[in-house]
Image (spheres, rainbow, N blue to C red):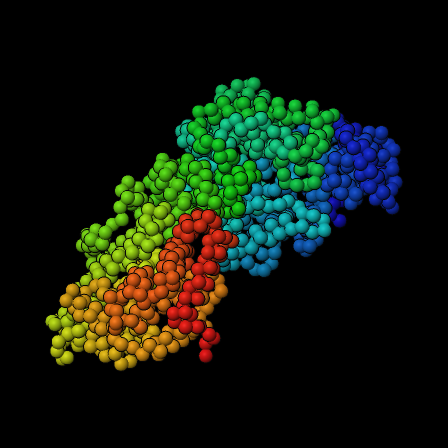
C-alpha cells in the first residue's frame, strides 16, 4: 500500500473538532450532488465508517459539501477513496503530515520504479486532501499549509533521488557511501528555490530546483562521465516526480533557474556553477538565491555550496547598484504607471499589480541592499524578513503589518484558485461566478464583499511598493508589462508581446533572457546589459512596427550575437530613434541584408553619417577608399581580408539605399556593378603583384578581365555571382616570366587566373568577396582557365555555339591595361557584328530556350528569371536581335538589356509596340529581382513574406497591393512570351 490505512472508527474526530470555517457554496444543489457522488463510492468496507463519520458530527456534511461543491479536484480525490476522507477527518492533521512524510523511509529499498511512482502519487493525493481540509477549515494557518506542502515536497523528492542513486549504483556507475541512505555523501545536490526553498510552497506549485554535483565527493566509476551520469540521474528523478500516470503526478519539476538554462546541462558541476555566479551572475539571480536551500540529495554538500556562494549573494557594502537592477525588473513588469484601476476578474494575484510578487520584491530588494552587512536580513521566509526589516529600522511597523496581512490573504486566495482544478495558475477567474466561488472558499458570502477585500489588499501592497520604487525612472511610455528576468514567462509580458504583433512571444522572452545571462560577448558586461534593459521596450516597439516582428527580432538577436561589444550600439539605438527605426526596417524587410549587417556591425557607423542618404559614392571615390584600406595591409592575406570587408560593407550600404528608396533599383544595379568592377580591378592588381613576387612578370605580357552576365550588363543584384573571363597575350611564344621561378606564358596566366579566382571567392574568416564563374570562357570547364586572345578569336570564329555568342553580347572589359583592353573590346565586337545565317540563329535561340525551360521551367510567376515570359525571354530577345542585325546595325550593340532594346527599337529593328511591352517588363523584372535578392535567397512565398518586403515590392512595382502586383506580373509575363514567340519563335517541348 502507498500509505498505512487507519481504521474508519476513531475515538475523536480530531480535525473536525478543530474546524473554524465551513464553505457556503453559491450553488448548494451542485454541492449536494458532488457530496452524493463521493458518498455513492463509500461502499463495502468504507460504508460503515463513512456513515459513522457523517452521522457522528453534524458539521461534517456541510463542511464536505462546501469543499466538494467548490473543487472538482478535491472531489475526485475523495471519490477515489472515501475511506481516505474518514481517515483524514478523524486524525490530527499534524500526525497525518508526520505519517506521510515518514512513509517513504519505511518502503523496501528494492522497490521497483513503477511501484515507487504509484506510492508517491497516492501519498501526494492523501497529502493534498489532508492539507486542503486543514486549510479550508482554518485548522492550520497559511504558514502551516505552505510548510506542510514543502515537507511533502522534500519527502517525495528525497525518495525519488534515493531511488535514482540506487539504480545508478546498481549499474556500477557509482558507489554509495551508505547504501541505507543513498543521498548521504553522494555529491548530488538538489537546491530548492523560490517558494519551495523558503518553505512557502503553494498548493499546486511546481518545485523549482537547481541540480548540482560535486566531482570530488561523488564516488564515480568513471569521473569523465560525471556530467552524463548526473544528467541521467536527474532525468530519472524528474520522470518519477513529473510523469502523469493513472494516479496523477507527484510534483512538476522545474529546472530552469539553474545558471543559463538554455546553454547548460540540467545537472551542473559545482565548479561550473561557482564560476558562472562569480563571473556572470545577475542581480535577479542573487535575489533568487536568497531562498535557496538543499532539499534532497547530499544535504551537507548543499549547505557547503550555500556558504560558498554567499559572497555572490551578499555584498559587503550597501548594494545600491543592485537596487537599480531590481528597479529595472519592476519597471519591466509595469513599464508604465497607472494603467487603470486594479482588476478583479482575471487579475493575477501573483504577478499583477499589488500582488504577491510585489511583497516578495519589496523584501528581497532591501535584503540585497543590506544583507551583506547584516546577517539577520539573510533569511528565506518573507514574513520573518518583514519582521527583521522592522527590527533593523528599514521599514515602519505599520508597513510590515499591512504587507504581512495582505501577503497571507493573497496566498490564501492563490491556494484556493489552485485547489479548484489542481492547476498551477495564479489568475482569478475572468467572470463574477468564478471569482465568487474563490471568495466563498475564503469564507466570503458574496462577490461584492470578496472583490472589495481583494481590491483593498492590492491597493495596500501597490501603495507601499510604489513608495519603495518611486525614484525609479521609466523605461517606456506605455508598452505594457515587459519582464524578462528569472526563467518563467510572465503571462502579462506574453500578452504585451502578442498585442505588439509577435506571433512567437516565448522565443522573444527566451532570447532576451539569454542577453541578460550574458550568453553573447556583447552582453557580458554589466553596463551593456543595463543599456539593453533601457533599450528593450523601445526596441520591441520599433521591431513590431515592421509588421514582421518575429523575423525582425531574430535578426536583431543575430546582430547582438555577433557583436564583439555592445555598449556603443545599444547606447546609440537607445538615444537615436531614427537609427533604431532604420535598423528595425532592415530587419523586418530584408533578413538577408540584416544578416550581413550582423556580420558587419560597423557598417552602422556609416549609416550614422548625415551625408549617407544624400550621396552615392562614385567609382573614383570607391576606388580611392579601397586603395587607402589596401595600402594599410600587413601582407597579402590581410589585403584580401580588407577587400572582403570593404566589399561586404559597401554592398550593405547599397542595399540600405535601395531599401529606403534613396536610390532606384536601376541605380542599385549600376552601383553593385561599379563596386564589383572596383574590387576586381584592385584585387587583380594585388594578385599580379603577388605572382610577380615569386615568378616575376611577363615582359611583353598583358591580361584583362572580361565581365559577362549581370556584371557585364551592369544589372547586378545583392546576390549576383561574377561571370568572368581572363584573356591575355604576349609577343614571343617562348617568352617566360622574369622571376626567380619563371613560368611559360600559358602556365603563368593560368596561375594568375587561379589566384584571382581564389582571391575573389575562397572563404576566409572574413567570408568571400563574390562567387565567381569562369565557365563562359572558350570550351567552358574543358578549356584552360585563362585564354590567349588569338585562341579566343579563333574559337569564337570557328567553334563557338550560338549561345556563347549570345553570352558575348554582355561582355565588357573591367580590369587590365587600357591598350590591351581596347584590343579585346574590338575582338569581341568583331564576333558580334559578323553576318549570320538567320534561320540557323533563330532555330538555335529557340532550341536553347526550350532546353532551359525543360530543365528549369516553372509556372511560379515570382520565379522571374526562369518563368515563361520572364527575364530570360527578354534577354534572349535582345541578344537574338543584336546578333541578327549586328552586321548591318552595329550601333545597336549594348551589354545592358534595356539599352539594347531601346537602340533596337530606335533603329526600327524591334517593333515599337513590342518594345513598349519589353522595356517596362525589364524594369519591373530587374526591380522585383533586386528587392527579392536583397531580402533573401530562394523562392519567394507571398503569403509568408515580411510586410516590409511586401511594401518594398509594391513600391518597386508601383502597384497598390501585392495581389495587384502579382496580377500585373502574370500579365507582363504572358505578354513577353507572346513577343518572344513573334520575334524569335515558338518554344515547344524539348526534343
Please say whether residue 574 is visible from this viewpoint. Answer: yes
The relative height of residue 938 versus residue 130 in the rendered view (above or below) is below
The relative height of residue 841 versus residue 670 in the rendered view (above or below) is below
Q: Which residue is depicted at the point 38% across and 40% down?
A: 580
**What percent of the width, then of the height, locates residue 369?**
45, 29
Q: Quadrant of the C terminus?
A: bottom left
Depth check: give the residue in front, 443 or 594: 594
Depth check: give the residue in front, 335 or 892: 892
Please identify the residue farthest to the bottom as the structure is shown: 798
**What percent of the width, then of the height, locates residue 29?**
82, 34
**What percent of the width, then of the height, locates residue 785?**
27, 73
Q: Which residue is depicted at the point 52% across and 35% down?
A: 481
Depth check: give the residue in front, 292 or 508: 508
Q: Which residue is depicted at the point 46% across and 41% down?
A: 545
Q: Quadrant of residue 987?
A: bottom left
Q: Quadrant of residue 57?
A: top right
Looking at the image, residue 2 sits to the left or right of residue 609; the answer is right
Q: Quadrant of residue 349?
A: top right
Q: Which residue is depicted at the point 48% across and 32% down?
A: 478
Looking at the image, residue 152 sits to the left or right of residue 559; the answer is right
Please say whether residue 414 is visible from this viewpoint. Answer: no
Depth check: give the residue in front, 307 or 24: 24
Looking at the image, residue 292 sits to the left or right of residue 452; the answer is left
**What percent of the width, then of the height, locates residue 157?**
62, 45
Q: How many marks?
A: 0
Amino acid at each position: 500500500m502507498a500509505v498505512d490505512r487507519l481504521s474508519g472508527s476513531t475515538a475523536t474526530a480530531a480535525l473536525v473538532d478543530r474546524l473554524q470555517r465551513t464553505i457556503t457554496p453559491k450553488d448548494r444543489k451542485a454541492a449536494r450532488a458532488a457530496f452524493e457522488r463521493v458518498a455513492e463510492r463509500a461502499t463495502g468496507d468504507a460504508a460503515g465508517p463513512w456513515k459513522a463519520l457523517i452521522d457522528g458530527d453534524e458539521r461534517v456534511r456541510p463542511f464536505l459539501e462546501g469543499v466538494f461543491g467548490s473543487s472538482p479536484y478535491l472531489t475526485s480525490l475523495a471519490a477515489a477513496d472515501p475511506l481516505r476522507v474518514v481517515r483524514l477527518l478523524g486524525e490530527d492533521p499534524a500526525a497525518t503530515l508526520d505519517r506521510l512524510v515518514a512513509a517513504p523511509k519505511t518502503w523496501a529499498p528494492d522497490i521497483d520504479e513503477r511501484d515507487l511512482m504509484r506510492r508517491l502519487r497516492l501519498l501526494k493525493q492523501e497529502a493534498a486532501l489532508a492539507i486542503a481540509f486543514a486549510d479550508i477549515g482554518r485548522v492550520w494557518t497559511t504558514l502551516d499549509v505552505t510548510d506542510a506542502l514543502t515537507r511533502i515536497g522534500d519527502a517525495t523528492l528525497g525518495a525519488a533521488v534515493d531511488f535514482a542513486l540506487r539504480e545508478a549504483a546498481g549499474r556500477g556507475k557509482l558507489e554509495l557511501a551508505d547504501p541505507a541512505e543513498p543521498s548521504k555523501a553522494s555529491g548530488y545536490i538538489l537546491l530548492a528555490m523560490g517558494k519551495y526553498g523558503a518553505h512557502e510552497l503553494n498548493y499546486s506549485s511546481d518545485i523549482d530546483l537547481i541540480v548540482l554535483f560535486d566531482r570530488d565527493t561523488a564516488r564515480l566509476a568513471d569521473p569523465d562521465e560525471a556530467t552524463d551520469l548526473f544528467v541521467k540521474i536527474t532525468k530519472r528523478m524528474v520522470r518519477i516526480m513529473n510523469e502523469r500516470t493513472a494516479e496523477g503526478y507527484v510534483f512538476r519539476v522545474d529546472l530552469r533557474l539553474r545558471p543559463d538554462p538554455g546553454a547548460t546541462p540540467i545537472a551542473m558541476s559545482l565548479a561550473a556553477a561557482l564560476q558562472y555566479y562569480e563571473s556572470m551572475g545577475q542581480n535577479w539571480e542573487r535575489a533568487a538565491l536568497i531562498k535557496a536551500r538543499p532539499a534532497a540529495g547530499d544535504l551537507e554538500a548543499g549547505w557547503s555550496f550555500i556558504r560558498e556562494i554567499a559572497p555572490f549573494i551578499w555584498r559587503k557594502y550597501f548594494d545600491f547598484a543592485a537596487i537599480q537592477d531590481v528597479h529595472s525588473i519592476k519597471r519591466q513588469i509595469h513599464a508604465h504607471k497607472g494603467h487603470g484601476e486594479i482588476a478583479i476578474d482575471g487579475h493575477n494575484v501573483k504577478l499583477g499589480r499589488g500582488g504577491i510578487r510585489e511583497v516578495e520584491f519589496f523584501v528581497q530588494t532591501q535584503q540585497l541592499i543590506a544583507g551583506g552587512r547584516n546577517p539577520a536580513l539573510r533569511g528565506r521566509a518573507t514574513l520573518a524578513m518583514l519582521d527583521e526589516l522592522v527590527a533593523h529600522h528599514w521599514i515602519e511597523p505599520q508597513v510590515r503589518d499591512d504587507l504581512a496581512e495582505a501577503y497571507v490573504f493573497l496566498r490564501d486566495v492563490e491556494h484556493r484558485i489552485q485547489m479548484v482544478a489542481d492547476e498551477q495558475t495564479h489568475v482569478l477567474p475572468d467572470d463574477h461566478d468564478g471569482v465568487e466561488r474563490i471568495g466563498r472558499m475564503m469564507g466570503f458570502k458574496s462577490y461584492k464583499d470578496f472583490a472589495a477585500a481583494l481590491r483593498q489588499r492590492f491597493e495596500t501592497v501597490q501603495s507601499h511598493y510604489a513608495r519603495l520604487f518611486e525614484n525609479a525612472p521609466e523605461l517606456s511610455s506605455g508598452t505594457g508589462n515587459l519582464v524578462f528576468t528569472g526563467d518563467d514567462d510572465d503571462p502579462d509580458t506574453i500578452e504585451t508581446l502578442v498585442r505588439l504583433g509577435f506571433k512567437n512571444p516565448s522565443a522573444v522572452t527566451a532570447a532576451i533572457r539569454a542577453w541578460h545571462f550574458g550568453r553573447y560577448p556583447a552582453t557580458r558586461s554589466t553596463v551593456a546589459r543595463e543599456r539593453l534593459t533601457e533599450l528593450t521596450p523601445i526596441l520591441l516597439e520599433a521591431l513590431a512596427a515592421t509588421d514582421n516582428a518575429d523575423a525582425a527580432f531574430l535578426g536583431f538577436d543575430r546582430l547582438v550575437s555577433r557583436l564583439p561589444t555592445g555598449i556603443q550600439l545599444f547606447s546609440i539605438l537607445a538615444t537615436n530613434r531614427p537609427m533604431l527605426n532604420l535598423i528595425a526596417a532592415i530587419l523586418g524587410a530584408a533578413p538577408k541584408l540584416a544578416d550581413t549587417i550582423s556580420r558587419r556591425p560597423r557598417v552602422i557607423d556609416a549609416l550614422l553619417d548625415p551625408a549617407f542618404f544624400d550621396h552615392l559614392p562614385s567609382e573614383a571615390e570607391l576606388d580611392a577608399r579601397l586603395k587607402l584600406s589596401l595600402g594599410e595591409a600587413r601582407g597579402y592575406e590581410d589585403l584580401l581580408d580588407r577587400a572582403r570587408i570593404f566589399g561586404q560593407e559597401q554592398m550593405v550600404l547599397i542595399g540600405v539605399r535601395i531599401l529606403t528608396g534613396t536610390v532606384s533599383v536601376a541605380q542599385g544595379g549600376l552601383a553593385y556593378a561599379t563596386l564589383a568592377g572596383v574590387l576586381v580591378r584592385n584585387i587583380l592588381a594585388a594578385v599580379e603583384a603577388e605572382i610577380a613576387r615569386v615568378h616575376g612578370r611577363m615582359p611583353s605580357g598583358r591580361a584583362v578581365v572580361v565581365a559577362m552576365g549581370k556584371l557585364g550588363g551592369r544589372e547586378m543584384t545583392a546576390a549576383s555571382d561574377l561571370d568572368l573571363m581572363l584573356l591575355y597575350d604576349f609577343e614571343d611564344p617562348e617568352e617566360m616570366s622574369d622571376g626567380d621561378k619563371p613560368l611559360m606564358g600559358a602556365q603563368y596566366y593560368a596561375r594568375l587566373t587561379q589566384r584571382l579566382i581564389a582571391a575573389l571567392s575562397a572563404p576566409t574568416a572574413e567570408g568571400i568577396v563574390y562567387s565567381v564563374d569562369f565557365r563562359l570562357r572558350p570550351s567552358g570547364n574543358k578549356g584552360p582557365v585563362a585564354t590567349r586572345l588569338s585562341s579566343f578569336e579563333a574559337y569564337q570564329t570557328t567553334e563557338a555555339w550560338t549561345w556563347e555568342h549570345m553570352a558575348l553580347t554582355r561582355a565588357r572589359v573591367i580590369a587590365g591595361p587600357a591598350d590591351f583592353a581596347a584590343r579585346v573590346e574590338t575582338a569581341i565586337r568583331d564576333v558580334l557584328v559578323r553576318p549570320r545565317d538567320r534561320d540557323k540563329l533563330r532555330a538555335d535561340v529557340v532550341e536553347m530556350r526550350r532546353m532551359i525551360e525543360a530543365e528549369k521551367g516553372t509556372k511560379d510567376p515570382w520565379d522571374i528569371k526562369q518563368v515563361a515570359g520572364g527575364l530570360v525571354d527578354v534577354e534572349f530577345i535582345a541578344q537574338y536581335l543584336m546578333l541578327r542585325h549586328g552586321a548591318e546595325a552595329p550601333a545597336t550593340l549594348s551589354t545592358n538589356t534595356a539599352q539594347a532594346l531601346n537602340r533596337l527599337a530606335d533603329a526600327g529593328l524591334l517593333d515599337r509596340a513590342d518594345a513598349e511591352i519589353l522595356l517596362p517588363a525589364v524594369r519591373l523584372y530587374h526591380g522585383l529581382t533586386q528587392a527579392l535578392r536583397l531580402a533573401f535567397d530562394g523562392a519567394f512565398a507571398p503569403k509568408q513574406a515580411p510586410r516590409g518586403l511586401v511594401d518594398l515590392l509594391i513600391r518597386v512595382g508601383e502597384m497598390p497591393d501585392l495581389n495587384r502586383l502579382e496580377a500585373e506580373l502574370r500579365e507582363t509575363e504572358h505578354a513577353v512570351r507572346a513577343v518572344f514567340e513573334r520575334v524569335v519563335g515558338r518554344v515547344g517541348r524539348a526534343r
